[in-house]
Image (cartoon, grey):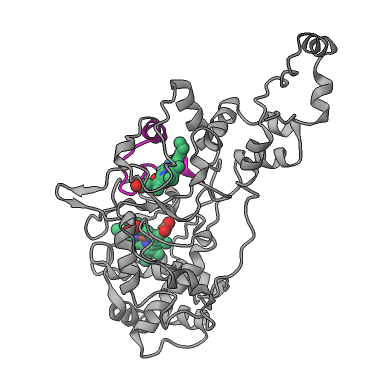
Amino acid sequence: MTPRRYGASAAARLSGFAIALCMLSGIAAPAPAPALDFTAEEERRILRHGPWPPASQPDPSNRVSGEPAAIAFGRALFFDPRLSLSGEVSCATCHPPERAWTDGLPRSRGQRTVDRNAPSLFNLRFNRWFGWDGAQDSLWAQNLRPLLDGREMGVGPDGAAGLVRSDRVLTCGYRRAFGAAPGADDERIFVDLGKALAAFLETQVSGRTLFDEFRDALARDDAAGQARYPAAAHRGLRLFVGRGNCAFCHFGPAFTNGEFADAGVPHFVEPGRVDPGRHGGIRKLHQSPYTLLGRFNDDAGRSTAAKTRYVDLRQSNFGEFRVPGLRNVALTAPYMHAGSLETLADVAHHYSTLDEERLHAGGERILRRLDLSARELADLVAFLETLTEKAPRHEFVEKPAEALCR
Ligand code: HEC
Ligand code: HEC
């Protein structure tokens, strides 16, 4: 593998003396300081993590995707605690915008404590499956789950539809978003709430980061731009796309391949009860009336349902969880599906000391115990931190419902 130079100008910066010395001794010319030059293969792997933000299209399964009136209605619903049985829990209870849409708890607490960690809500529009177990195949269906689950909000289809019909502001918001007053079919209104919430959440795409600046500088062979990337992050990035093999799963612009894997994280919920992960998710998906195969998909051709149609249950799905995206990851501690790791240093340590015996030996082994040095652990963390925005914008509106229909 030949190291790729920062650009033609880089060679010119090497002193003639150094070059002559190298030629005499027969060694390749050293990379220019502070360079940690990437090989062509490494560079190819790095470039695949951008550009950011990627282009996006409205969701064909949701007829109000991208519609401003639905976005406004969805925002109001997100902050409305009347969508819980207790009247005290809203989506923002577990996904507060000022904390990067996550609550900082290992496992979330709504009306009661749940089994899993609340994921951040950035970049959902690029997901293929939703929830740690992928039990939902659309963003709108995912948004219905807390409304159905008594531990979270539990208002249910009739409770939610009743609220929308009886509240003047919500009725008006619904009419503006969907072009008609809420009808008599509770379940249809209920699903529409999921769709308005989805229209709102689709707007939450994380911003550009130090990594993106570096990646784009690499793409245009801009040495000065690349030099601004911290040296430790540079080394961590090399581990991430190289020996660590992290990019095998944390792949692409959002740093996830969108699929499921066993990363060696224990999945006991409590003694004697395990979280089945993807295995349970597929079973729920097959039973749900709210999938892309069902009557609520607005895409008449059902082309959006292809992936759902072909999902089948395998024993190897047991204990697999969705590969999380890593953008803004420094803001979303604690980590993993049940928040079992407190810091990014703990995550790096986890991969470094991985117990390979714990992993399913399904086919080719992707994860290996890395035995990283203290400096390598710090480098990996430094790299992960550069995937985080300096100052994420956060959407906080004092009384969103009142702004809906004056
Ligand atoms: C009790 C706390 C709690 C409440 C309330 C709550 N959530 Fe969540 N949310 C979670 C947890 C925990 C998960 C992970 C669920 C899982 O994998 O089983 C999650 C997952 C999600 C996801 C999937 C993210 C992904 O990466 O796949 C979305 C979207 C979401 N919630 C939106 C909402 C919306 C919209 C509401 C309000 C209607 C809401 N949540 C209410 C805790 C909560
Ligand atoms: C085989 C696929 C795979 C590989 C390879 C992999 N990961 Fe992961 N990663 C996952 C999965 C799956 C999870 C969630 C596991 C869980 O919650 O049980 C995860 C979780 C994480 C998280 C926590 C994110 C969050 O929001 O909770 C971080 C950070 C992370 N991985 C970084 C890395 C790094 C760094 C490497 C390389 C050393 C790596 N991953 C290699 C699949 C992988």
Where on the image, by quarter, is ligand 1? bottom left
What is the x, y in percent for residue 71?
52, 69
Residue at the image point whose x is 52% and y is 80% from the top = 299
Q: Is residue 350 magenta?
A: yes
Is 229 situated left or right of 286 in this image?
A: right
What is the x, y in percent for residue 92?
38, 58
Is 202 situated left or right of 140 in this image?
A: right
Which of the image's four quarters has the N terminus? top right
Residue at the image point whose x is 50% and y is 66% from the top = 200
Query: Would residue 283 be visible to someone looking at this image?
Result: yes
Please tell me in which quadrant of the rendered image residue 152 appears.
bottom left
Q: Is residue 226 above or below residue 333?
A: above
As drawn, the residue found furthest toward the front would be 363
Is 366 situated left or right of 13 in this image?
A: left
As drawn, the residue found furthest toward the bottom would be 184
Residue at the image point whose x is 66% and y is 31% from the top = 38
Residue at the image point whose x is 38% and y is 30% from the top = 349
Region rendered in magenta: 327-351
Query: Would residue 332 be visible to someone looking at this image?
Result: no
Exactly how many numbered labels are in the figure?
Answer: 0
Is 199 situated left or right of 18 in this image?
A: left
Q: Is residue 55 magenta?
A: no
Please tell me in which quadrant of the rendered image residue 58 appears.
bottom right
